[in-house]
Image (cartoon, rainbow, N blue to C red):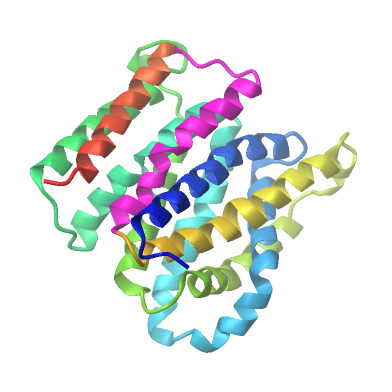
Amino acid sequence: MYWEKRWFQYAVLLLLAFVWGSSFILMKIGLKSFSDQQAAAIRIVFASLAILPYSIKHLKYLRKKDLKSFFIVGFIGSFFPAFLFMKAQTRIDSAMAGMLNSLTPIFTLLVGLLFYKMKFNWKQVSGLGIGLIGALGLISSGEGISFSNVNSYAFFIVLATVFYATSVNEVKTNLTHLSGLQITSLMFFFTGPVALVYLLTTDLQVVVGKPQWQLHLLALALLGTIGTAAALVLLNSLIHKVTPIMASSVTYIIPIFAIFWGVVDGEKITLFHLLCMGIILLGVFMINRKK
């Protein structure tokens, strides 16, 4: 493939943005029949099943020294964020979730500086501050522009972006000797069984009695196979060729698709939301700007 080509790298970013921007509406559909914990577990289970043949095939590449990294990438980078996003989606609409997800590059820089010895310049630090201002504006816009109206569920997404940032840095620092497919398949080898066991402890009998639950399950199946397994293979492959910041910059394109699906679904987007998103994107642009 053309992973070394700049145009191909940006094409992958656009594809990932479309897939993940569409994921928010699939979450919303899945939550019509399933609880947020069930929906998150189902997402991980389908992702694990989709990539299971490769997980078995690539077990020969599993090394003891990589176990810590796989647990970080698997649980911190995928398992827990799935639950956090589903929980947030019970109180936050799809477009808002997509906008807040733009924090990922900012936290990628911050986590990289604190724990992975990433180099930086003051323009990046300025961008970090600007992006955080925009994020705080989004979080505080539940019922009005006031910090007294902070929607606490937004912080689940903020925490998930910190986890994503940690995972991206971990892959770039400690797992570049493996391919994106190897990393993704082996991480789901650990997280899949945990998600399945948890799912079986929930009350699935209630779900069967709900109308169109099969359609809602299909949405979660698509979310798991395409929006999780396939997308993570692309992301982990991209991380090999670009900086962690550029790989995570996919999240500034995601809000565009998240807004599109939100409008299609009848969600309300205000000018203040767009202003805050613009502030976030300005911050991320400054982080990625070359000298």
**Relative to 128, is 105 on the left or the right?**
right
Residue 253 screen position, x and y as percent: 43, 38
Q: Is residue 2 above or below residue 174?
A: above
Which residue is at a point 22% across and 30% down the rendered structure image? 130
The answer to if 87 sits in the magenta stretch is no
**Relative to 248, is 29 on the left or the right?**
right
Residue 66 screen position, x and y as percent: 40, 79
Residue 136 screen position, x and y as percent: 32, 26
Residue 127 screen position, x and y as percent: 20, 36
Which residue is at a point 29% across and 69% down the rendered structure image? 173
Which residue is at a point 63% across and 66% down the rendered structure image? 192
Q: Main secondary structure of the magenta part?
A: helix
Q: In which image quadrant can residue 2 be found?
A: bottom left
Give the residues in magenta.
243-270
Which residue is at a point 24% across and 57% down the rendered structure image? 112
Kindly tell me whether residue 22 is visible in this rendering. Answer: yes
Q: Is residue 162 above or below residue 260?
A: below
Q: In which image quadrant can residue 206 be found?
A: top right
Kindly tell me whether residue 128 is visible in this rendering. Answer: no
**Relative to 83, is 138 on the left or the right?**
left
**Relative to 186, is 120 on the left or the right?**
left
